[in-house]
Image (tube, rainbow, N blue to C red):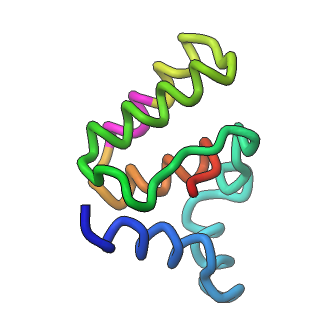
Amino acid sequence: MGGGLAARILAFRYLPPCLVQNETNKMGAQEMEVRYPEVQVQMVGEDGNAFAIIGRVSKALGRAGVSPEEVEKFSEEAMSGDYDALLRTVIRWVSPN
């Protein structure tokens, strides 16, 4: 994995307030809340392949005691769009590092 994934995550997490507001308007305020902020998932320095990301997040959710049905919801949402949508989904579900 190159620096692309890390840059995307950091850029999204540290957007200027005006851009965060725009993103909130696009996605809806409740979708911006992290569902499982206590679940930390290593993203920087890891494989940036979409399926590798989904696998890492799914395992982390399972280890945190999240129900299999909820983990399946994450997987379905993560696979429902393009790569950028995947990253936004990860950020809505867990706290990437």
Q: Residue at x 61, y 20 (%)?
A: 63
Q: Hey, which quadrant is residue 27 in on the image?
A: bottom right
User: Which residue occupies the foreground of this view, 55 or 20?
Assistant: 55
Question: How far across and how far down the image is residue 13, in percent?
Answer: 60, 71
For this view, does 23 lie left or right of residue 87?
Answer: right
From what the image shows, is residue 27 above or below residue 10?
above
Quadrant placement of the N terminus: bottom left
Q: Nearer the viewer, residue 74 or 55?
A: 55
Q: Residue at x 39, y 55 (%)?
A: 85
At which x and y percent is residue 53? 36, 43
* Residue in the picture at 57% in, 53% down: 96
Q: Can you give x and y, in whole percent of width and height, for residue 48 in the image?
A: 29, 54
Instruction: From this view, report whether residue 92 is shown above or below residue 52.
Output: below
* Image quadrant assignment for residue 36: top right
Q: Does 23 sit above or below residue 67?
A: below
The span shown in magenta is: 75-80
